Amino acid sequence: MVSLFAGLVATAAMTLAELPYWRLWKLTGVFEWHENQVLISKFFRLDVKRLNFPGIFLLHFINGGLGGVGLLLAIKFIPQLSTVPILLLGVFYGFLLWILTLAPIHKPITGLHPWNHPLGKGPALASLGGHVLYGLVLGSIFLITHIAI
């Protein structure tokens, strides 16, 4: 349960860090939010051009909470991971989640290529920063609570 909570807190930190980029670039500049907007719109047959912040953030926090559980499971099932300092592991995990969310799914969901984005490289770098922050906060909570140690 602590890992789910840690994932939610880490997602809150990531969300706060992404707010300035949303103000700067709007929805298409915050990759995770853009993906969630399209998914929610398709699932509930809503107008994709009409912002659905409750849906965007619901998916964002579900993914982030489950991400916390995922890190704990990875540590439990891959014993070698328990030898890596948890803050470093958290940062690596955030980077891994960034690669997994950008490379295979961003373009099929949004229609925009993350590496050849109309807004340039900034959104990809902002997304990377958000994911690294997520991993750092997640690892910090794991460290403070002694989870998985």
Image (cartoon, rainbow, N blue to C red):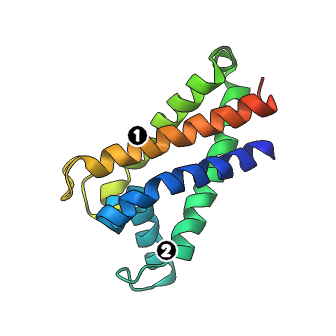
Is any atom of residue 103 visible in this view? no
Q: Is residue 122 above or below residue 54?
A: above
- Measured from the top left, where is residue 130 in percent x and y? 46, 46
Residue in the picture at 27% in, 48% down: 122
User: Disc 1 designates what residue?
Assistant: 99
Residue in the picture at 61% in, 59% down: 61
Residue in the picture at 56% in, 66% down: 57
In the rendered image, the quadrant that contains the C terminus is top right
**Which of the two labelled residues, at mark 1 and mark 2, occupies the earlier sequence position?**
2
Is residue 84 rendered to the left or right of residue 126? right
- Disc number placed over residue 57 in the picture, else none: none
Q: Nearer the viewer, residue 113 or 11?
A: 11
- Measured from the top left, where is residue 23 in percent x and y? 36, 65
User: Disc 2 designates what residue?
Assistant: 40
Cβ–Cβ under 8 Å for marks 1 and 2: no
Q: Is residue 9 above or below residue 90?
A: below
Is residue 138 rendered to the left or right of residue 129? right
Q: Which amino acid type is shown beneath numbered disc 2?
A: Ile
- Measured from the top left, where is residue 102 in percent x and y? 37, 48
Is any atom of residue 74 visible in this view? yes
Tag 1, which secondary structure?
helix
Measure the alpha-carbon separation of dots 1 and 2: 22 Å
Q: Nearer the viewer, residue 43 or 81?
A: 81
Q: Is residue 54 above or below residue 45?
A: above
